Image (spheres, helix red, strand yellow):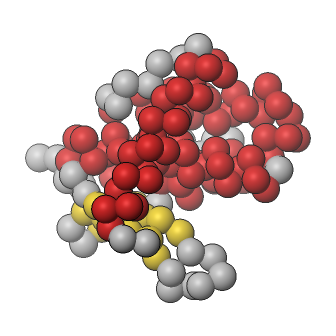
């Protein structure tokens, strides 16, 4: 995948997250740092609303990638970064946001909250990532 295609894909996915938040929960995502707390609520909201269907593989993949893209695009608007498609494990490629020497797995943190531990905070992960780049 070309870099330009990847950047467009992730921007489009972030916009899909904004539309989904509005359509499913009547919540507004505005690409502000404060809006990331809403992502925490939305992810658990899908489990409340759709129960086990929200945890099916296809749903999890979509939710984590779309809302991970939103978190990453929000991060990019505040401090920058570029998306990287990592194929080092061909059977399980993934997308990271890279800034300087650091990389961030925003879809991965969404997965952790949605599937493994509802106490994991996307907002905290975002804030910690942001703190590495803001003076």
- Residue in the foreground of this view, choosing between 62 and 130: 62
Identified at 35% across, 56% down, the residue is 7
The percent position of residue 70, horizontal first and vertical second, equals 44, 41
Q: Is residue 121 left or right of residue 24?
A: left
Instruction: Classify residue 74 by image quadrant.
Output: top left
Identified at 39% across, 45% down, the residue is 11
Q: Residue furthest left?
A: 135
**Quadrant of the rendering where the N terminus is positioned:** bottom left
The image shows a total of numbered marks equal to 0
In the rendered view, tell whether residue 73 sits above or below residue 33: below
Q: Which residue lies furthest to the top in this view?
A: 26
The percent position of residue 41, horizontal first and vertical second, equals 60, 28
Q: Residue furthest right?
A: 52
Identified at 59% across, 14% down, the residue is 26
Residue 117 in view in this figure: no
Identified at 56% across, 75% down, the residue is 93
Q: In this view, does 22 lie to the left or right of 82?
A: right
Instruction: Classify residue 30 by image quadrant.
Output: top left
Q: In this view, does 135 lie to the left or right of 21?
A: left
In the rendered view, tell whether residue 102 sits above or below residue 31: below
Residue 121 in view in this figure: yes
In the rendered view, tell whether residue 120 sits above or below residue 91: above
Instruction: Classify residue 22 by image quadrant.
Output: top right
The percent position of residue 35, horizontal first and vertical second, equals 41, 27
The percent position of residue 126, horizontal first and vertical second, equals 39, 45
């Amino acid at each position: 995948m070309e870099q330009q295609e990847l950047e467009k894909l992730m921007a489009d996915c972030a916009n899909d997250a904004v539309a989904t938040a509005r359509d499913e929960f009547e919540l507004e995502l505005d690409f502000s740092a404060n809006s990331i707390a809403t992502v925490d609520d939305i992810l658990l909201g899908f489990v409340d609303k759709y129960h086990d269907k929200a945890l099916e593989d296809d749903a999890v993949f979509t939710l984590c990638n779309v809302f991970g893209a939103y978190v990453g695009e929000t991060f990019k608007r505040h401090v920058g970064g570029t998306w990287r498609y990592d194929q080092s494990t061909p059977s399980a490629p993934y997308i990271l946001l890279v800034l300087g020497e650091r990389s961030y797995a925003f879809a991965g943190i969404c997965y952790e909250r949605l599937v493994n531990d509802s106490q994991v905070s996307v907002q905290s992960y975002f804030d910690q990532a942001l703190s590495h780049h803001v003076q």
